[in-house]
Amino acid sequence: IQQALVASCPIVFLELLFGLADAGIAVVTINPKSSSKEVAAALYDSDTRVLFVEESLHRQEYTSCTDIVITINDEYKSWLSKNNKPLPLPLIDDNSIFNIIYSSGTTGAPKGICIPHRTRVMTSLLMVMGKRNAHDDVMFVFASLAYGGGNVPVLATLFNGGTLILATNIHPENILRTIQQFKVTCIYSVPVLTYMLLNSQRIHKYDISSLRSFVSVAAPFSVDLKQKALSVFGNIVYDVFASTECGWISTLTPAMMNTHPSSVGLPVAGCTVRIQREDGTEAEPNEVGEIFSNTLTMFLGYLHSDPVNEFVSVGDLGYKDQDGYLYIVGRKGDMIITGGYNVHPQEIESALNTCPGIIESAVVGIPDEKWGEVVTAFIVGAPEIDPLRHCRNSLASYKIPRKIFYVDSIPKSEVGKILRKDLRKSYK
């Protein structure tokens, strides 16, 4: 039996997630910002029997997708009051499904990612080993609890005896005020929010000295942003490379940022990373290939698919240097092929983002009759110098953008990943 959960109230979300998991019921966690079409698709695909949904988010079509709908309002309170007799809890097999998270669909149709109980427990233990979580932590959480990036630090904090502050307002000043008021010790942030915090004119007006770790997750963390974060927060800034499927893969510590700032660090305990060529052989140091990993925090597999193999890839491309540090250059589906050359957008974005006056950039390939694809850049900001000339100092000629568009913002997913499909559509 599987049940789905769509809730914007974090307290109720956690109450249901823990209660249903203790009862041995797999929970499909759905982002409350999902469209009704996306919610319905997840309900059908997961064969959900019971849906818990915020009253304001409920749509009539959901009733045809599942057996029972319980809206989170007085109906939910009534349901609880009728079922308040303690029941003996089942013994949970550590390989049974804890929750099912649907992928964002940035590279295809969303897939149900099945996360077992053992993965969430092992992640919590690894976070203690990595000194990123402690029994007296006060964790400020503002990521969606429906995704791994949100519920992993929440579960680990509670597992290890810490305290949670659940955000309802993620305005930079509210975050700073909350850190000061509740003596927050740990924050998980995405780069776009980190940028907003660091550029807040009021960041130095609040006491944020209680922070012991500031962790960047979910999207590329530029070298410039890392350095600025270190200068403001001190040597407590971490960059974590992870995926919903494999969990925690590598960490770049504050000390590593001084020696290998453009990497995502070294594999964590129990993780093996392999860089693979297209023919399946292992790449040499500094050779770009597809990143495969085998971790202690692996998922079980995709819903309706065979169990996972020993090593899993989610489409990231990168390389390891001679010291074993891991570098990300982009995603397999994002690679641009222009004039027969392979070009990785993230490399160009990193170069563009160091140009004075550029706030951020995104690069995609646009179909072209002559070149196959042409490197096209979308830029936010007002460059103080010619960005093309700036790129020539660090990029090969075929990587230089042939077209540039200035935009007000870059479309991103909730966790900060660039939505390149939307950029290509906007160009058309």
Image: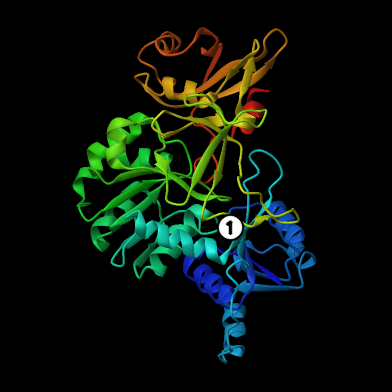
Q: Which of the pair 323/139 is nearer the observer? A: 323
Q: Is residue 179 left or right of residue 155?
A: left
For this orientation, the residue located farthest to the bottom is: 85
Q: How is the image coloured?
A: rainbow
The picture quadrant where one finds residue 338 is top right
The picture quadrant where one finds residue 278 is top right
Residue identified by numbered label 1 = 32
Quadrant placement of the C terminus: top right
Asked if 416 appears above or below 374 in the picture, the reply is: below
Q: Which of the pair 253/74 is nearer the observer? A: 253
Q: Is residue 345 left or right of residue 253?
A: right
Q: Classify 10 Å Cα crowding around label 1: few (below 14), some (14-19), many (20 and above).
A: some
Task: Residue 347: give x, y in percent of width and height.
Answer: 48, 23
Residue at image x 58%, y 16%? 375
Name the residue type under label 1.
Answer: Pro
Q: How many marks?
A: 1
